[in-house]
Every structure is written in structure tokens, then in C-alpha cells.
Amino acid sequence: MTGRRRLGPDDGPDRLYTVTGGRSRPATDAFDVVTLIVAESAPVPGMQSEHARILRLAEHPIAVVELSAELELPVSVIKILLGDLLEAGRITARHPRFAPRTNRLPDVDTLKQVLHGLQRL
């Protein structure tokens, strides 16, 4: 038997409908499976449990697909929940390809060491 958890009676379409409030699409297209999510605030009392778990998991950057695996929910459901949190200003989302790039070049000494190491091969 694999390490996958068995679906129980609480994991069907009714639960997913409840978790998303009946929505089938996220309010925004800001999320891709590799989009990195970072929590901007801690969970608050009375918050939906899935939202709270996302905020706890996103204390450090985490990809949408990783959240899906951790919460054992489909990516489409995670995107809906993330849309709620983004709208509330509780998370930031950044796609890796849009991450700020530095204009710093490696220093000359490092480049020389790399060149010498390659020449010794």
C-alpha cells in the first residue's frame, strides 16, 4: 500500500463545495502551480481552517502545488482559497520568472578561481 491517504466520507465534492463557498474558479489568474506564496499576517481566530493552515504553511515561501499537497486539496481549490487571502492582503504571490533580478556581476576573483578550476580538469 502506498503512503497516500484514503478518501473518507468528508473528502467528497460536498466538502470541496463547502470549502470554496460554492465557487469553481478563482477570482484572479495570479496563481500558477509554481507561484510562490508568502504569508503577510498570522491566522486570526474565526478564520476558515484552510485559510489558517495556508498562512501557517506560508510563513516561508511555498509553491501553490506544495500547498495543494500539504492540505490534500486540488490545486483548483487552493487557487480559490489563495484568491481570498490575496484579496484580504494576507499573502503575497510571486511567480519565479518575475522575481527581481540583481544586476550584480560576480567579482573578478571568483571568476578567476572558476577558470583555474576548469583548466585543472
Image: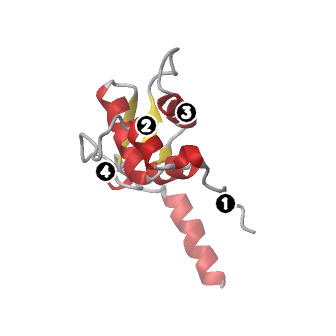
The answer to the question of whether label 3 and label 1 lie on touching residues, with beta carbons closer than 8 A, is: no
| Residue closer to the observer: 26 or 37 | 26
Image coords of residue 90 (percent x, y): 40, 26
Residues 106 and 92: in front is 92
Q: Amino acid at mark 2?
A: Val
Tell which circle, 2 or 1, labels the residue nearer the N-terminal end: 1
Q: Residues within 10 Å of mark 4 (few under 14, many from 20)?
A: few
**Left or right of residue 17, residue 61 in this image:** right
Q: Secondary structure at mark 4?
A: helix
Q: Amino acid at mark 3?
A: Arg
Query: For the point 41% across and 36% down, which residue is it?
Result: 18
Mark 3 lies on a secondary structure that is: helix
Residue under circle 4?
98
Circle nearer the viewer, 4 or 1: 1
Q: Do the residues bearing badges 2 and 1 touch, measured as CB atoms within 8 Å?
A: no
Q: Quadrant of residue 109?
A: bottom right
Query: Secondary structure beneath disc 1?
Result: loop
User: Separation of disc 3 and disc 1 at Cα?
Assistant: 20 Å
Q: Would you name the residue on which mark 2 appears?
A: 19
Q: Is residue 98 above or below residue 42?
A: below
Q: Is 26 left or right of 11, judged from the image as shown?
A: left
Amino acid at the residue labelled 4: Phe
- 103 and 53: which one is in front? 53
Give the alpha-carbon distance from disc 4 to disc 1, as whole Å: 34 Å
Kindly state the secondary structure of the residue where label 2 is placed: helix
Residue topped by disc 3: 53
State the separation of the CA atoms marked 2 and 1: 21 Å
Sequence-wise, which precedes: disc 2 or disc 3?
2
